[in-house]
Amino acid sequence: MAKKKKSLSEAVSSEIQANFNLDGFKSKKGLTSKAKFKEQEWIPLSSAYQEVTSVPGIPMGHIVLLRGHSDTGKTTALLEAAVEAQKRKILPVFIITEMKWSWDHAQMMGLNINEVIDEETGEVIDYNGNFIYVDRETINSIEDVSGFILDLIDEQKKGNLPYDLLFLWDSIGSVPCEMSIKSNKNNNEWNAGAMSTQFGNSVNQRITLSRKESSPYTNTLVCINKVWTLKAESPMGRPKLMNKGGYAMWFDSTFVVTFGNVMSAGTSKIKAIKDGKQVEFAKRVNIQIDKNHINGVTTRGKIVITPHGFIDDSDKALKIYKEEQSEAWKKILGGGDFIIAEEDQAYTDITSHTDEPQ
């Protein structure tokens, strides 16, 4: 079969390409490749978390969501990350809009905190240390949160904040957008739109770009995401766990951990009891890696939450923890022996909705 001859235009095009220097063009236009990403590093969480999830902890340079119903371990994971970040000279930046924060709990978990004491009264009047903390005193809207994060990243770029930053937001769904505030109406669609504009189109891109080798610092955003339960669409259907604040953060996140169940918190309380007095010292909870674009590992299991962090869901781990804390519990319970009891809450239903509740 005869070989097809090139047309004149094809021949000219081939000749031009043969003599064209693409690298020179890229250099002239400032398009030299800076696409290489840093080797993936992790902020490790407790050995119990690592054992049940099969991942080291929090992936640096990524958007991470910790989602679930109330009191299911999300804050414990956030604080474990903050404690380990301090040890690695990474600066934790707490953005607390949920306003359930406890400095006592943070210290119990191992966060390095300095108490500021009033010289006259001897009372603790403030806390400082190797972290940044803001709350609803200055942050009252979705736009405030994004503006604060971007400002710190800009200061970092200028050389005024020489740290890798670990942003810790508690929580998505706890503050409205500015339009909702001005109208005095907490409109879920407006809030979701603001999350998409402020984070999906801005903050999240800045976080991801810090993973490039051309960036001197690596920044990470960990968000606790409030959830709600969507009613099943049919009698044979299943309810769904939905994120408050829309799904911009879900789409941009590369790592999502879900705590608890869809229709319930999925926890069981573990208590020390004596003569009617009791100390709730732990909760057993389901934990699942729902999304993992880092190494693809997705797992499901159970873990035990304590005021000091996660421990293994095993008789041995509970026994060790009981022995470590027994003296403190005796002071509360009035001394002597006490019993350990477990109260199952796994099947206590949470109200489901057809639309996101206000």
Image (cartoon, rainbow, N blue to C red):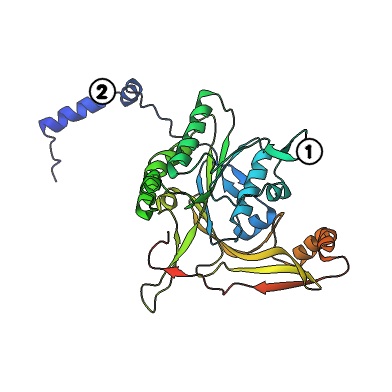
Residue 68, above or below 40: below
Q: Which residue lies furthest to the left in this view?
A: 8
* 297 on left or right of 269: left
Q: Is residue 127 visible?
A: yes
- Camera-nearest residue between 328 and 60: 328
Position of residue 349 measured from the top left corner of the image (x, y, whole percent): 52, 73
Residue 190, above or below 23: below
- Camera-nearest residue between 163 and 332: 332
Inspect the image, locate mark 2, and give the three-letter code of the amino acid beneath it: Asn
Residue depicted at 41% across the width and 51% down the height: 251
Position of residue 252 measured from the top left corner of the image (x, y, whole percent): 43, 48
Secondary structure beneath disc 1?
A: loop
- Residue 88 location, quadrant: top right
Inspect the image, locate mark 1, and give the three-letter code of the amino acid beneath it: Gly
Residue 219, above or below 318: above
Position of residue 227 measured from the top left corner of the image (x, y, whole percent): 48, 60
Mark 1–mark 2 Cα distance, whole angstroms, equals 80 Å
Which mark identifies residue 19?
Answer: 2
Q: Mark 1, residues whose alpha carbon is within 10 Å: few (<14), some, or many (≥20)?
A: few
The C terminus sits in image quarter: bottom left
- Residue 3 location, quadrant: top left
Position of residue 8 measured from the top left corner of the image (x, y, whole percent): 11, 30
Image marks 1 and 2: residues in contact by CB distance under 8 Å: no
* 38 on left or right of 339: left
Which mark identifies residue 122?
Answer: 1
* 189 on left or right of 80: left
Which mark identifies residue 291?
Answer: none
